[in-house]
């Protein structure tokens, strides 16, 4: 019997500290991918809704940007404790709207806490510079916020990705418009409620829900100074070009095709568990997923262990659903095409079902061996729990496969040789490199961001690099005439 999922209230835009009235314009249903049932409805906003949000953010900006940063971070210290207090409710929301396992959803909120902690350290990180540049002349450099900024998020991390931008941008004095993914709009409202409870003044964070129309309106809006985007490469390019053509700052993170290079001297057990976790975590719907392995030389034993590990990953238990029916069909088509083209399916996750969740969109862990570089599953982002294994004879061949793909988010090598590891660190054409680590996410205070078609724009989206993105430098040169000093007498 199919389980009934929780029904959530209608999603509303959040402007000037209030949830707006129920939408009267275009709306869209929100499905839980765990069951395929409708759990809410959201507004698909347009320029009128965006204008209201921008006006609220503009109104809040003078007071917020002139609040000392040491006061601004106090709100985020309180917010961190509220995230901890409401961890379960936040993780349940992520699970319900995105389909992750509870542990994965909780890990997302834990990451949000780490991102908030980093923002709380901003007063230590953004001190200015000062120098007497010639006799009596002082130069001073300070970081100033940009104004109203926007953050556009994808479906795969409804809680964490908004936290890539909200704490840093806001602590640095900006006011913000958040546009969550229309597929997972629930977490954002709870984030707004907790920030209000922590003391964030009205209008500093505003949320407008919607699809393409609102994204285009954000890129075009003359009062928005900067746009950060996370999503697929095709849309990242469109957003980057459109926002920068309107003379805004933009950083746009795109999709990925991350290669895990496995050498014969790799530790078999550690490699197998890392590779299986990398390809299947969050049902493979991570831009850091190691969806492609390149086995160099004699690695049959390691491949066998990977299959053994992947077999332990069970839909509905330690493997969540994929986001939609369309995603499930796309992923299964990739598997079928690779098989038809001559690859060997060692573990087949097609047609997976979960008892009591028959309407859910599950794909089981899948391992395909002898994929060749010309196959679609070797070239495109599959975004499902699927590992495509290619074989080469040399590390240079493996690197040339990795480096000829247009993306450049992450790459990893598994080896017990320091010099092989170093060779990959030096020669892999990607922004984030793992050595014996399948998901090499740089933790705070380091910055997250790929290269090539995985990121457009100059800065990374988190960590120290994001400070550059969310601020501008004010340079003041000061000179006083020493003769004009008055020796006051009372
Ligand atoms: P997506 O590109 O479909 O959507 C992202 C955002 O763009 C959403 O808010 C959506 O409403 C909006 N959008 C969708 N179509 C649009 C259009 N035609 N014009 C303007 N806006 C549009 O991405 P997704 O499916 O939500 O997320 C998955 C993708 O995001 C994957 O490719 C994944 O690799 C990528 N991603 C990358 C990173 C990274 O750090 N590089 C992190 C997370 C996700």
Image (spheres, grey):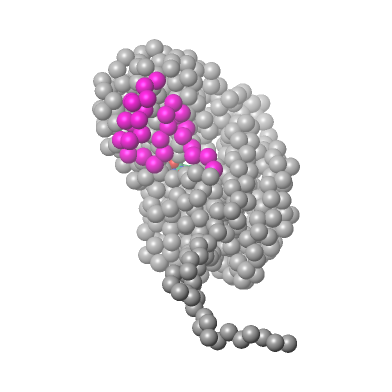
| Relative vertical location of residue 427 with respect to residue 248 in this rendering, above or below | above
Magenta stretch encompasses residue 288: no
Residues rendered magenta in the picture: 416-444
| Residue at x 32%, y 14% (from the top left corner) | 298
Q: Name the residue rendered at 39%, 62% in the picture.
A: 244
On the rendered image, what quadrant is the N terminus found in? top right
Question: Quadrant of the image for the C terminus?
Answer: bottom right
Near-viewer residue (317 or 165): 165
Q: In which quarter of the image is residue 246?
A: bottom left
Judge left or right: residue 388 versus residue 57.
left
The residue lying toward the viewer, choosing from 481 and 459, is 481
Q: Residue furthest top?
A: 301
**Location of residue 78 with respect to 420 vertically, above or below:** below
Residue 63 in sight here = yes
Residue 437 among magenta residues: yes
Give the residue at x 42% y 29%: 435
- Specify whether 162 is left or right of 226: right
Looking at the image, can residue 330 be seen? no
The image position of residue 419, as x and y in percent, is 33, 26
Q: Say which quarter of the image contains residue 160.
A: top right
Residue drawn at x 57%, y 63% is 174
Looking at the picture, does residue 169 appear above or below residue 112? below
Q: In the image, residue 145 lies at what x, y percent?
A: 54, 64
Q: To which quarter of the image does residue 257 belong?
A: top left
* 145, 283: nearer the viewer: 145
């Amino acid at each position: 019997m199919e389980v009934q999922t929780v029904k959530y209230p209608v999603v509303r835009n959040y402007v000037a500290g209030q949830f707006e009235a129920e939408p009267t314009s275009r709306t869209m249903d929100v499905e839980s991918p765990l069951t395929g049932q409708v759990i809410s409805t959201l507004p698909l906003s347009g320029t009128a809704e965006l204008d209201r949000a921008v006006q609220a953010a503009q109104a809040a900006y003078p007071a917020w940007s002139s609040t000392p940063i040491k006061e601004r971070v106090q709100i985020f210290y309180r917010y961190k404790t509220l995230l901890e207090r409401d961890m379960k409710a936040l993780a349940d929301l992520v699970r319900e709207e995105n389909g992750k396992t509870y542990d994965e959803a909780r890990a997302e909120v834990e990451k949000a806490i780490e991102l908030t902690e980093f923002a709380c350290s901003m007063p230590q990180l953004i001190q200015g510079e000062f120098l007497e540049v010639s006799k009596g002349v002082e130069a001073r450099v300070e970081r100033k916020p940009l104004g109203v900024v926007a953050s556009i998020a994808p479906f795969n991390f409804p809680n964490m990705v908004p936290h890539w931008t909200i704490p840093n941008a806001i602590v640095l004095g900006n006011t913000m418009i958040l546009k969550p993914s229309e597929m997972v709009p629930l977490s954002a409202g709870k984030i707004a409620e907790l920030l209000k409870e922590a003391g964030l003044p009205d209008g500093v964070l505003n949320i407008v829900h919607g699809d393409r129309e609102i994204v285009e309106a954000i890129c075009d809006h003359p009062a928005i100074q900067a746009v950060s985007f996370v999503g697929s490469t095709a849309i990242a390019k469109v957003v980057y070009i459109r926002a920068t053509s309107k003379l805004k700052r933009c950083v746009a993170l795109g999709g990925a095709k991350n290669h895990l290079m496995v050498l014969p001297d790799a530790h078999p057990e550690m490699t197998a568990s890392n590779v299986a976790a990398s390809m299947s975590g969050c049902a493979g719907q991570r831009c850091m997923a190691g969806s492609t392995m390149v086995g160099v030389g004699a690695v049959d034993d390691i491949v066998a262990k990977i299959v053994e590990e992947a077999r332990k990953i069970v839909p509905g238990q330690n493997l969540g659903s994929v986001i939609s029916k369309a995603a499930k069909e796309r992923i299964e088509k990739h598997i079928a095409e690779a098989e038809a083209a001559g690859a060997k399916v060692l573990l087949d996750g097609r047609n997976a079902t979960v008892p009591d969740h028959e309407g859910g969109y599950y794909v089981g862990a899948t391992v395909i061996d002898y994929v060749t570089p010309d196959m679609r599953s070797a070239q495109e982002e599959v975004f499902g729990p699927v590992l495509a294994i290619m074989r080469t004879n040399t590390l240079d061949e493996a690197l040339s496969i990795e480096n000829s793909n247009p993306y450049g988010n992450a790459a990893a090598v598994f080896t017990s040789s320091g010099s092989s590891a170093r060779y990959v660190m030096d020669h892999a054409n990607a922004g984030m490199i793992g050595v014996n680590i399948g998901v090499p996410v740089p933790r705070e205070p380091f910055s997250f961001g790929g290269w090539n078609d995985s990121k457009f724009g100059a800065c990374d989206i988190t960590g120290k690099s994001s400070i550059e993105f969310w601020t501008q430098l004010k340079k003041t040169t000061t000179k006083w005439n020493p003769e004009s000093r008055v020796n006051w007498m009372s």
